[in-house]
Image (cartoon, grey):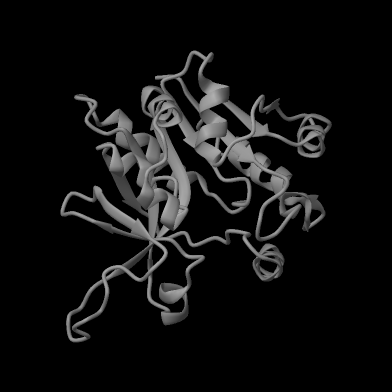
Amino acid sequence: MKIISMIPARYSASRFPGKLMQDLGGKTVIRRTYEATVATKLFDDVIVVTDSDIIYNEIVNNGGKAMMSIKEHECGSDRIAEAVASLDVDIVVNVQGDEPFTDVESLGKLIDVFKDDDEKQIDLASLMVHITEADEINNPNTVKVIVDNFNFALYFSRSPIPYPRDTNIAVKYYKHKGVYAFRKDAILDFYTLPMKPLEASEKIECIRYLEYGKRIKMVETDVQGVEIDTPEDLERAKKLWK
């Protein structure tokens, strides 16, 4: 299989504009993410896909690979689908541009899902992390996921799922990490299918796959990392980097 990583990188993030160009230990967040992804040595290629000249130049001028998006896009998967349409590739791994702590072990687990899927029953795979802090479980910026007995995703939400109506029942809460691995045909399908109400309500792009009957295999990881969604996240990332 030919496996590449694409890093969608928007400059005008709604909650933290310009976050990918913020300093993290002497380099920008997007450069840290790109270099960490390359350093895993898991991919035949790593490419940043962006709508921003600033981000494009940041990557290319520092020896990396980048592509400019032709169109405006609602989400990272749309941006990747446009870029990957003309490429000869089997599996595309989407690493979020604000995830500079993405690690080789977690990415390797995602790729292994497809190596073991001889009958091609899995459309995409993604990561989840067990969380226990009430603040994180109730935080709408933290996307939660519930799975079946075979770790296929049942639903994603910004609300706590499952809802703890009976507090005596021991349930686990899982945070969805925004790292995906797609079959090429699955992400091209995503690009052509219109957004439906559940995705529009939650603003969680992977819900579109579920609404159209795609199968998402979730892989548990112990690596928390820091997703940089807010200035406070950036400060936590700086402390962790040190």
Asked whether 214 or 88 is in front, the reply is 214
Asked whether 189 or 36 is in front, the reply is 189
- Position of residue 56 measured from the top left corner of the image (x, y, whole percent): 76, 33
Q: What residue is shown at x 67% (from left), y 40% (from top)?
A: 35
Asked whether 234 or 9 is in front, the reply is 9
- Position of residue 86 measured from the top left corner of the image (x, y, whole percent): 53, 13
Q: Is residue 142 visible?
A: yes
Q: What residue is shown at x 55% (from left), y 40% (from top)?
A: 76
Q: What residue is shown at x 53% (from left), y 15% (from top)?
A: 87
Say left or right for 34 vs 200. right
- Name above or below for residue 156 compared with residue 57: below
Q: What residue is shown at x 31% (from left), y 37% (from top)?
A: 113
Q: Which quarter of the rendered picture does the N terminus lie within?
A: top left
**Residue 220, located in which quarter of the rendered image?**
bottom left
Q: Is residue 5 visible?
A: no
- Name above or below for residue 4 compared with residue 27: above
- Name above or below for residue 73 compared with residue 159: above
Say left or right for 104 vs 23. left
Say left or right for 227 vs 213. right
- Position of residue 92 measured from the top left corner of the image (x, y, whole percent): 47, 29
- Position of residue 187 measured from the top left corner of the image (x, y, whole percent): 42, 29
Q: Which quarter of the rendered picture does the C terminus lie within?
A: bottom right
